[in-house]
Amino acid sequence: MVRTMSVSKFGDINYNQMETLKELGNIGAGNAATALSAMLGKRVALDVPKTELATFDRAINMLGDPCRMTAGIMVRLGGGLDGMLMHLFEQPFAEAVISGISGRSGIDLAALDEDSVSLLSEVGNIMSGSYVTAIADFLGMKVDISVPALAVDMLGAIMSVPAVELAQVSDTVLLIKEDFTIGNAKVNSQLLFIPSAGTLDGLLKKLGAMI
């Protein structure tokens, strides 16, 4: 008889389970890149995403200067996959997508006008939705996604939001770094996935990755 191990937090994941989560990250990021390409009307290339488990403090260090201006787009997940997704965009990414859609130049992330805020929110919404849809289709489950909430602030301030989630689940997040090439511009974004209690265990069981 094979004994299964319950997984309720990221710190309990073994190597094989981590590789499975990386594959899900690749699928979701590829779908998001396709959606971004459709929005911009131009080819968007994606390098293989870098997926890592990190404590909250280490994630902050991996993301860079906590005083750097960043746009964070957060969506809540419900249904078969409860938790939160947060996309982090910096100046180069925001400038590439906003100018690519609107044709405007001189985009300043720290001083976005109402139209730019709306565009960036929509980009985050579509990318997050495409990411979740790809995973939901792969797993054969229904996942609900909330209206996106956009915040532009210093990275450290934005990361205080997932910190609240971490206090309820574990001290670790799944961090996915995505490197895109949009036209001639190389830009990147980061995606954080924080599941609610019990979601990770159910996800891995669904994938058949329990040992």
Image: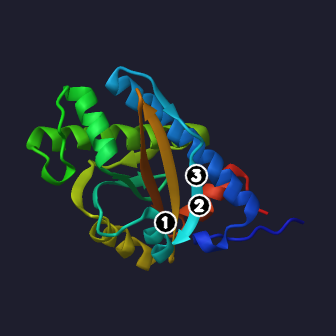
Q: CA distance from mark 2 to mark 1?
A: 10 Å
Residue pictured at 18% horizontal, 33% vertical: 105
SS assignment at label 1: helix
* Residue 192 visible in the snapshot: yes
Question: Which residue is label 1 attached to?
Answer: 62
Q: Nearer the viewer, mark 2 or mark 1?
A: 1
Q: Are marks 1 and 3 in contact (CB under 8 Å)?
A: no
Q: Amino acid at mark 3?
A: Lys
Left or right of 209 in this view: 29: left
- x, y percent for residue 141: 54, 44
Q: Are marks 3 and 2 in contact (CB under 8 Å)?
A: yes
Q: Quadrant of the C terminus?
A: bottom right
Q: Are marks 2 and 1 in contact (CB under 8 Å)?
A: yes
- x, y percent for residue 38: 38, 23
Label of residue 52 in the image? 2
Question: Which residue is label 3 attached to?
Answer: 50
SS assignment at label 3: strand
Residue pictured at 67% horizontal, 59% vertical: 18
Residue pictured at 21% horizontal, 37% vertical: 119
Give the mark nearer the N terminus: 2 vs 1: 2
Badge 2: few (under 14), some or many (20 or more) residues near its Cα, within 10 Å? some
Q: Is residue 90 above or below residue 5?
A: above
